[in-house]
Each structure stands twice: as C-alpha cells, then as structure tokens.
Image (spheres, grey):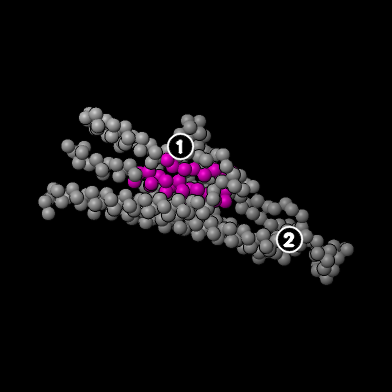
C-alpha cells in the first residue's frame, strides 16, 4: 500500500534526478565552449524510463504485482559523449545556442516536476488530514 | 555528483574566460610596445584551455570502464606565446629602429583581439546564465514538499 501511495512521487523523483544530472552536463558543455578538442555530452533517461514504464504497465494488466516498481526507481541517467561531430576547426562540437536552449528547457522541466511533486505531497496531506 | 558541483563547473568557466579577458587586455595594452625586458618587441600571448581532469587517473579509469565520465569544468593549461613574425614598420626616428630605419612591432592584431574579446565576453555571459539556472533549480529543490 505504501508503495502505491508514493508511486507518483517515485516516478517524479526519477525525472528530478535525470534533469538535475542533465543540468550538470550542460553546464560542463558551456564551460568548455572554447576548449579545443572538447566533445559535448548528453544525458538520456526519458527513453529508459518509458521502456521500464511500458513493461510495468504490461505487468499490471496481467494482474501481477507492481514488480517493476523497483526497476523504475533504480533508473539512472546515462551520460553519453558525442564523439562523432565537429563544428569548428578546433574539433570542438559545442554549439552554444543548442546548449543554452537545452539549459532553459531543462530548467523548466525541473520546475514542472517540482511543482507536480509539491501538488502530490499536498494531495497526500489532504488525504491524511482530511482537510 | 555532489549537490553543488555544477556551481564549481560554472565558476571554472568564469575564471578561465576572465583570464582570457586579462590576456587580451594585456595584448591590446602592449600593441605598440617595441621594447620589453628581453629587448624584443612584445609578443602576443594566448590562453590554451582544456577540460578539467581530462588527463587525470579517474578519467582514464572511467574511459576504460566505459562508464559515464565525471565532468569537472574547464582549466587553463597554458598561456602560450604567439610565435608569428613581428611586423616591420618604417620609422627611422624610433630608438628601436634598425640601421635601415625599420622597427619591429608586436605581432598583435587589434581586430583579432577584439573578436577574441567578444568571444570571451559571450562565453562569460553563458557561464553566468548556466550558474543562475542551476542556482534557481537548487532553490526550487529546497521548496520540495513545502
């Protein structure tokens, strides 16, 4: 029961972890905007999360327990280095416009998740206190 | 990944870009310096940046293990001398002029320096924006559950 209670909070937590890590990686890309030979990194966790969620739904349909809940909460954001491309003569592939856009987008995603999580908590609080 | 490591990354970017600005300023200030301590004209300097920790043991281990590498920011690996030739200018009255009346002027190009300065300035701004984005996220994280 407690697992169910905090299920959405756990989902949101995965999102918060992922966007937090992505912010760190984007910051590093921006800091190395002028470093010769530097290759940018990306963070991927949405697709992993979607995959896990899909298998979770299948399990639920077959009336089994939330067996993949653990799987969902253990999803770690994966950092990949983009080694292939080079925009400039110095072999650096950081496009500052792309990075700034990703930064803004990522921040908004993070804010959205935080406010969603806060509303989950206030819902729980309402259910507990009844007011 | 520590809680405030992104701030250190942005700070390293700010430090590196500020040093670039310092060196550019020095180049512009010495654009007409024909006589330095060594007796030569002023030689243009430039900053070489590298990813912080990219040659550390940790990063080699990460690469060998193909795990996600730890990100550490940027650092200045050296302040190098630009070894391009000095410009020769005819100015026989100058005390540094050679017997033909030519003076060796520093290899500083004002337009190059100005372009580099804008580049450093914009990169500095980008780091400030990243820093603020991170700061706002961290403040938001503290509001969780409130």
Q: Quadrant of the N terminus of chain A?
A: top left
Label 2: how many residues lie within 10 Å, few (<14), some (14-19) or many (20+)? many
How many circles with numbers are drawn on the protein?
Answer: 2
Question: Which residue position holds label 2?
Answer: B106
On the image, the x and y values in percent for residue B72 come to 48, 45
> Residue extending furthest bottom?
B93
Query: In the picture provided, is A131 more to the left or to the right than B47?
Result: left
Q: Which residue is labeled 1 in the image?
A: B68
**What residue is drawn where x is 40% and y is 50%?**
A106
x 35%, y 50%: residue: A110
Q: How far is the residue under mark 1 from the one under mark 2?
A: 45 Å
Q: Chain of mark 1?
A: B
Q: Which quarter of the figure is the C terminus of chain A placed in?
A: bottom left
Q: What residue is at 38 percent from the left and 36 percent from the top?
A: A48
Residue B27 found in image quarter:
bottom right
Residue found at the very far right of the displayed protein: B100
Depth order, front residue of B75/B93? B75
Q: Secondary structure at mark 1?
A: loop
Position above or below: B93 against A71? below
Q: Is B124 colored magenta in this rendering?
A: no
Tell me: B9 left or right of B78: left
Q: Position of residue B34 (x, y in %)?
A: 75, 63
- Comparing A12 with B25, the one in front is A12
Query: Dot 1, how many residues are within 10 Å of its Cα: few (below 14), some (14-19), or many (20+)?
Result: some
Instruction: Evaluate whether residue B42 shows in this view.
Output: no
Q: Is residue A102 left or right of residue B98?
A: left
Q: Is residue A29 visible?
A: yes
Q: In the displayed image of the protein, which residue is found farthest to the left?
A: A130
């Amino acid at each position: 029961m407690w697992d169910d209670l905090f299920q959405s909070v756990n989902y949101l937590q995965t999102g918060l972890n992922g966007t937090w890590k992505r912010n760190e990686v984007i910051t590093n890309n921006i800091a190395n905007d002028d470093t010769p030979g530097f290759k940018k990194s990306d963070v991927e966790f949405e697709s992993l999360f979607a995959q896990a969620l899909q298998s979770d739904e299948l399990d639920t349909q077959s009336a089994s327990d939330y067996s993949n809940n653990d799987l969902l909460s253990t999803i770690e954001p994966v950092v990949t280095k983009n080694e292939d491309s080079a925009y400039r003569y110095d072999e650096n592939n950081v496009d500052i416009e792309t990075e700034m856009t990703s930064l803004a987008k990522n921040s908004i995603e993070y804010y959205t998740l935080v406010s969603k999580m806060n509303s989950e908590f206030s819902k729980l609080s309402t259910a507990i206190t009844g007011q | 990944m520590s809680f405030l490591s992104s701030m250190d990354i942005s700070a390293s970017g700010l430090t590196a870009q500020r040093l670039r600005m310092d060196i550019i300023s020095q180049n512009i200030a010495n654009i007409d310096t024909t006589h330095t301590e060594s007796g030569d004209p002023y030689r243009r300097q430039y900053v070489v940046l590298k990813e912080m920790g990219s040659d550390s043991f940790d990063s080699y281990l990460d690469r060998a293990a193909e795990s996600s590498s730890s990100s550490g920011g940027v650092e200045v690996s050296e302040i190098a001398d630009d070894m391009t030739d000095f410009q020769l200018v005819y100015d026989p009255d100058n005390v540094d002029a050679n017997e033909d009346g030519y003076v060796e002027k520093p290899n500083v190009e004002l337009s190059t320096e100005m372009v580099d300065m804008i580049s450093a300035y914009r990169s500095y701004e980008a780091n400030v924006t990243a820093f603020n984005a991170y700061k706002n996220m961290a403040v938001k994280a503290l509001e969780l559950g409130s």
